[in-house]
Image: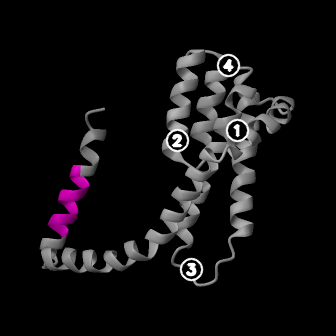
Amino acid sequence: MKFLSLVLPLLFVSLFLYALFRKVRLYDVFADGVKQAVPLVLSLFPYLATVLILSELFERSGLSAMLTNALAPVFKFLGIPPEISKLVLLKPFSGSGSTALLSEILNAYGADGYIARCACVCYGSSETVFYVSAVYFAGVKQKKLLKPVAIALFSNFVTVVFGCFLCRFL
């Protein structure tokens, strides 16, 4: 374990030494990189703000609760405990919200039970699809997002169903 904690510092030092050997002006190159990052951050901001606002509206409007209640029987039929329905719906929108929800589930049902295991699998096997899409597609001129987002949401859902199936036996 001690060796693994040295990997990043050793990588940093070796790159620094390599740059010195190649006579690269590190400070100037770093400053140029930062200059290029500022326009990228400015172009990403509207998309990230939109995703964050929409996720908050999804929760505060009550749509999340209505969808959770409506889909809980379907989820139960597919082997997903109804207690984690909200987590399944929230994870594609918000990483921090799903982390808080996972914590609530673990506190309510314990860390070793079937529901908690399914919640952990759901949390760990899925991604914040809309946030990642906003970041990746912000720089793309043609915004054809329907297919990639639909595929990502479908694959997230399949991993949750399969993960909950595996949790029954583990």
- Tell me where residue 127 appears, x and y as whole percent: 59, 49
In this rendering, the answer to whether 163 lies above or below 144 is above
Label 3 – label 2 distance at C-alpha: 28 Å
User: In the rendered structure, which disc, 3 or 1, sits on the residue that comes first in sequence?
Assistant: 1
Q: Residue at x 53, y 68 (%)?
A: 136
Mainly helix, strand or loop, the magenta region? helix
Q: Return the x and y of residue 26 as percentages of the image width and height.
A: 15, 74
Disc 2 on helix, strand or loop?
A: helix
Where does the magenta region start and end?
Answer: 9-18
Crowd around label 3: few <14 · some 14–19 · many ≥20 (10 Å): few
Q: Residue at image x 62%, y 33%?
A: 121
Disc nearest the viewer among 3 and 1: 1
Amino acid type, label 3:
Val
Q: Residue furthest front?
A: 61
Q: CA distance from mark 3 to mark 4?
A: 42 Å
Q: Which residue is mark 2?
A: 97
> Horizontally, is 103 left or right of 31 in the view?
right
Q: CA distance from mark 1 to mark 4?
A: 23 Å
Residue tagged 3: 140
Q: Earlier in the sequence, mark 2 or mark 4?
A: 2
Q: Mark number for residue 65?
A: 1
Q: Pointers 3 and 4 in contact (CB under 8 A)?
A: no
Q: Can you tell which quarter of the image residue 168 is in?
A: top right
Number of numbered discs on residues: 4
Q: Amino acid at mark 2?
A: Gly
Nearer to us of marks 1 and 4 is: 1
